[in-house]
Amino acid sequence: MKHTERLRDRPQWVLDHIAAQRTVDTAEPIAMAPRMMPPPASLDPYTGTMTDGHIAHLLRRTLFGFTMEDLRHFRGQSLSQILDTLFQEQTVPEEPVNDYVDSGQGESDPQVAYGESWVNHTYDGDWESGRTVSYKVWWLRQMLEQPRSIHMRMHFFLHHILVTQSWDTFYGKLSYRYWKTLFDHCFSDYRSLMKAITKDAAMLGYLNGNQNSKEAPDENYARELQELFCIGKGPDAAYTEADVQMAAKVLTGWKTSWPEAEVGFGAWDHDTSDKTFSAFYGGHTIRGRVGQAGAEETDELIDMILDNDEAAAYLARRLYQFFVFPEISEEVERDIIQPLAVVIRDNDFQLAAALKVLLASEHFMLNEVRGAIIKSPVDHIVGAFKVLEVDWSAGDDLHYRFVRNRALLWNMSDGGMEIGDPPSVSGWPAHYQAPLYDQAWINTTTVVRRALDTDSLLYWGLWSPVENYFADYLAYARTLDNPQDPNALIADTAMLIYGIAIDAETSTRLKDILLSGQSTDDYWTIAWLEYIADPDDEMKRSLVVNRLRYLLQIMFQSGEYHLG
Amino acid sequence: MKRRSFLSTAAKSVLIPTAMSRMGMSALVPGVSPLAHAMSMLGDTDKVLVLVYLNGGNDGLNTVVPLDQLSNLSAARPDVILPENRLLRLDGTAVGLHPSLGAFKDLYDEGRLQIIQNVGYPEPDFSHFRSTDIWMSGSDSDQIVTNGWTGRYLDREYPDYPIDYPNENAPDPLAIEIGYGQSLLFQGPVGNMGMVIRDPEYFYELIENEESTVPDTPAGDRLAHVRLMARQSQQYGAVVVEAAERVTNQRDYPAENYLAEQLKVVSRLIAGGLQTRLYLVSYGGFDTHDSQVEPGDHTQGTHAYLLEQVSEAIGAFMQDLDHLGTADRVMGMTFSEFGRRINSNASVGTDHGTAAPMFLFGNHVAGGVIGNNPVIPSSVSYDDNLEMEYDFRSVYSSIFEQWFCLSPQQVSDLMLGSYDTLAVTSSDQCGVTSTTRTFADKPQLSLAPNPAVQSTTIRFSSTGGVVEISLFDLAGKLIKTFTKAHYPEGDHTLSVSLSGLPSGQYAVIWRQERFRANAFLIKH
């Protein structure tokens, strides 16, 4: 593929945008001196009651935001019933369509009619930035509109491990195919996913697989295949530089045609020598094969790597760090990670099955695990949108909707997370960089930005070029069981938006705010009930609005809001 | 304790008032002086270090080209080799800079750019993440250190941070990272010492709110972190905006240059009077596995673009510092997690390598080229890499020693080991605070009456700008700040009340930019 030409094709704003996205990346997952760490408990199933707090904790970690309605849906169900629902695969969403041309300005994409799917269309330098943004906005919409299934979050997890960057790919069709490959394998085994993603066109471009040649091997993919995708760099990850070089030889021959971008095996550029690996891989030799049989070596390589015990342990750690807690203590390594690795192996690398065991465990339900991961920018925005009943649709005009929803993408990008484009091949630093880990999401800039986001939603509207986004806080209050009771209103709001329970003192303080300093609960109750009885009365409405909105502003500005 | 030759600096600017003779000279004995202590409370260096991180692993061999190795280099990396006649040869050396580095060449010719060849570390790691960690933490290849070399320095200088920060003596952020992430660099042994800034003109006020107790859980750790960031955003945010607003006349920076944008902010904050000593800016894209150069013209392509951006950004930064009168206080250093292979690959690029050159820039760098050209064998295989000549920690140690003026023991404590140092400054920067803008005469500060009973009048001079005058007791404790305000150029008087002040000896300390003067006051 003519990568240089593609680079040149990119508009200046894309190059600037890419440059601005690059952040400092350091470190891979390593155990560090613990501050507070969850005790190990065990991987045995949690058998206690499922309170609202337990359900909320589970939903916070498996969905992108949730509402009172979601929580109510699961009330009274056992943990395994809830997990059965959450682990149902979601249907394949409708493909992203051409919503990126501004037909009002006379724009048109010669390949794709307005409103038609663009995912099978060949590279067009004029429209790849439009398609790429369309892809990302569409992806964001899948998060906003997800059913009660872990599918999209599992998909996001895989995106964190098997990274490509869509601005690097700069080819909508390939970005979509990458997305779909991950989507299709969320509930299948990691072996088949690895075999597919190794031959994925976006990945072959991103980590130089296309250029990996028998004359001049390119180690980029061979290295990350081990370091980031399958084995990691834990203390027992003893693969060698020679293993990287051998793997690079095995992987020679995969090519992507241009401009169609179909992947094929070019036997002419495959290194047909035998490849012998180090003792870490049992001194295994992959026999060099000629012709199309050379492609089989790739699958043998992936099987060899995943057969190493360290692979399941690494994947167990990644699951744990993403869904439970970013740091791994020695006890957790022993009592949770290693048993979970066994589950992964026993289930032939079906990560979803292992994750289900993890989420059903005593350990996951520990109080010490609750609220122990700071929300990512996506969790912040999507979560706030869902709970505050923000209307993110934009009528039938596709381009209008595209422009409106795109503002959210840039907002999250400013917050440090642009979906589809992690800052580097190792993903977002919040998931791997000691010692801050998830705390890296919150710095002096982002903490203020997030407050500005939620204040905007509540007061003057979160910005988009066409129509700002507004919280419907009255609709929100109506979703609660007892909005007329100030105690219940505050307790339920805390349960929905905070990662941890609030103490009595905080609850009292918040109630003072809601009651404007009055001491009788009835003042709020009466105000609310009068408003409900006559919702069109401006005076009654404003009495409720002024208090409720300020309460929500303060609760969203509080530190507890960022705990996920 | 912090600046080894503190008193030799102080002696130049300290005025000895008439009251001194009555008090005797004991208060000025070096080392134990209460006054010295009082002065040290103010933060005793105005020097700034700007770290420029070239993310991805910059190809050293196409940045600083060894002219005496060109034939072997051509054989080893035919796909990316630069044409000799386009290289910017540095006078008196066997080194040529990449043709995109015109602004660097100018700085070099002015003695304001220094090149250190073949910097690396033993047992190099080829992983971006590991090697970045190593460079940022200053660890050995096989050692895991979860704090940064500069974070440790700040922790040493401000040991209780972040408890009770900001405060009177350290009102400004300790370190500033421009951009998005909080890197390992400013991570101290306890907490992160840095502040992240994107837009210095932007400040949003949060609602002040009572806070509940932080629970003793992992979530509690996070809650404490969020609250700290919220608090600092309010406290430091206002300070930063205030500093930025003071500077409105910067020089032009190149357009559409992300590094230049960042450096422009850094320059603005330095000139705006922040006492912040460390800045980090980053620029990515150096992982040039493919398309490093244009096949038809090796002086064009990704790497040329990146180097041009870096060179022009730093060139503009230096001109802006000159213009704003801050250039003497600033040193810059580029670093990248590794260099690249000697061999080019089949994708018109280069793969991860080892040692590479570093650049230091600033008015007081030693200049020139330290180190030898790397030797390129006549036959290079893919696995061959450049030998390291200098450990990167030697460079860090040298900066600590010669720019931040730490003792050898202090340096080795911070660097977790002892490393040879190199000459990185052109002259001794630790004895004297050099200046570009100077007072026509010595800064004026006097008190009358002195001794005083109820009040006294302070006479002082200003170069035009913010003057701060504070009262300290001789244990170095800040009693009160009389003024911190803008005064036009010239002499001024300020009458201050001393009522309620216990009888005894005090120091009145005047500060403007990096100048300090003090006078003793006796209260009856």
Image (cartoon, grey):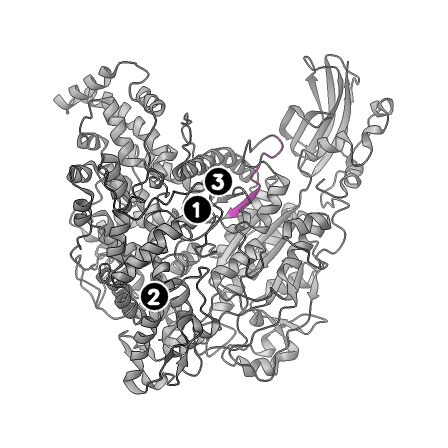
| Residue B219 at least partly seen | yes
Tag of residue A169 = 2
Looking at the picture, does residue B512 appear above or below residue B415? above
Q: Chain of mark 2?
A: A
Looking at the picture, does residue A398 appear above or below residue A180? above
Q: Are marks 2 and 1 on the same chain?
A: yes
Locate residue B348, reporting x and y percent. 45, 76
Gap between marks 2 and 1 measured at Cα: 27 Å
Mark 3 = which residue? B201
CB atoms of marks 2 and 3 within 8 Å = no
Q: Chain of mark 1?
A: A
Image quadrant in which the C terminus of chain B is located: top right
Residue at image position (59%, 39%) is B274
In the rendered structure, which amino acid carries the disc numbered 3? Glu
Looking at the picture, does residue B348 appear above or below residue B133? below
Locate residue A326, reporting x and y percent. 39, 49
Mark 1 = which residue? A440
Of badges 2 and 1, nearer the viewer stands 1
- Asked if residue A530 lies in the magenta stretch, the reply is no
- When asked about the image quadrant of residue A289, the answer is bottom left
Of badges 1 and 3, nearer the viewer stands 1
Q: Are marks 2 and 3 on the same chain?
A: no
Gap between marks 2 and 3 measured at Cα: 35 Å
The magenta span reads B168-177
